[in-house]
Each structure stands twice: as C-alpha cells, then as structure tokens.
Image: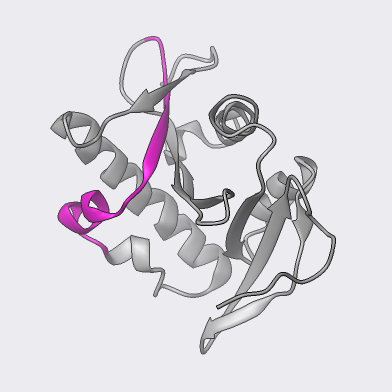
Amino acid sequence: MPNPSRPRILPLDLASDPGAAAAVHGIGRAAYAVEAELIGFDGIPALHEDLGEMLARPLHWLGAVPEEGGIAGFLAWEEAEDGGVAIDRLCVAPAWFRRGVASGLLRHALAEAFPGRRVEVTTGAANTPAVTLYTRFGFVRGADFSPAPGLRMASFTTGPAAGSGPRPGP
C-alpha cells in the first residue's frame, strides 16, 4: 500500500530513464482504461499507444514520486506556438486515486513549471473527476466537442485571456 505522505513533484527525463518511461507508460494505460470506462469510449489514443509512440511525442514531463520510490502519477505538456501550454495528459496510478496526486501535479505545474501562462486541456466530458479538478483549479470550461462518434470532450482554459472569448484557430 502506498505511503500516505504526499509524493514530491519532480521533472522526469523519460528519454534517459527507461524504468521511468515504462512506469509512466503503464500508469497511463491503467488510468486511461479507467477513463474509458467512465466516458464509455475505449478509443482514447493514449490508451493504445506503445512506449515508442509515447516517447516520440514532444512532451515535457513531471512525476509525482513517493518517498519509497516509483511514480504515483504524472503530468505531460506541450509548448504552444502562442507561448501557452497544452496539457497533453494528467494520469494517476489507480492505487493512488483520491490521494491528492493529480491536484499536487497540477498545482506544481501551474505555479512552478509554467506560471502565469495560458493553459489549455481537454478531457472526456463524462470524466467527472477530471472536470471537477480543472474547475476547482479555476479553469474556464469552453465548448464541448466531438472528435469521434460516441465521444464528447470538454475543453478548459486558464491563465491570461481565459474566458475572454474565442481565439483564432487553425
């Protein structure tokens, strides 16, 4: 059973640490399997990517590392061309659900990794835990959208210009 103390939030270098990369990949698969059940859609791309595909993504990684080692959860993001940040994934190992890991990762990322920047994230609209988390952290919900039949996604933004109306897009 995991230590009840809060894990430390640290940068992860998955390219040079195969053990961490494998752990992150496994946690992502387990967390996305839970989300797939919550939202009734098992076509989540990250659920089906292999380790090489995950590592090929241009992502920056933070990990929640418990005292006893291992990884309890992680947050990965991409830098946006407009200077903002797009959170690509925020996953927690199921054994660590409801222990503040996602909140700790998000709090650290917003305050330390990309403070004061515009942050965008999407999640399954029926993923109540994620929707609640982003709302609690002050993200403004934008329009829901459906990238695939049977899937409704919720979009969120925080930081400069959040909630100020639509932005030009591609």
Q: Nearer the viewer, residue 100 or 109?
A: 109
Q: Do we see residue 125 in this rendering? A: no
Colour setup of the view: one colour
Q: Position of residue 150 (x, y in %)?
A: 54, 86
Residue found 24% across the figure and 31% down from its top = 20
**Residue 110 falls in image quadrant:** top right
Q: Quadrant of the N terminus?
A: top left
Q: Do we see residue 154 in this rendering? A: yes
**Residue 26 falls in image quadrant:** top left
Say whether residue 56 is left or right of residue 45.
left
Answer whether residue 54 is magenta in the image: yes
Q: Position of residue 134 (x, y in %)?
A: 70, 48
Q: Is residue 111 above or below residue 161?
A: above
Q: Position of residue 93 (x, y in %)?
A: 42, 38
Q: Nearer the viewer, residue 96 or 137?
A: 137
Please state the extent of the stretch shown in magenta in the rendering: 49-67
Say whether residue 36 is left or right of residue 59.
right
Q: Quadrant of the C terminus?
A: bottom right
Say whether residue 17 is left or right of residue 98.
left
**Residue 21 falls in image quadrant:** top left
Q: Position of residue 22 (x, y in %)?
A: 20, 39
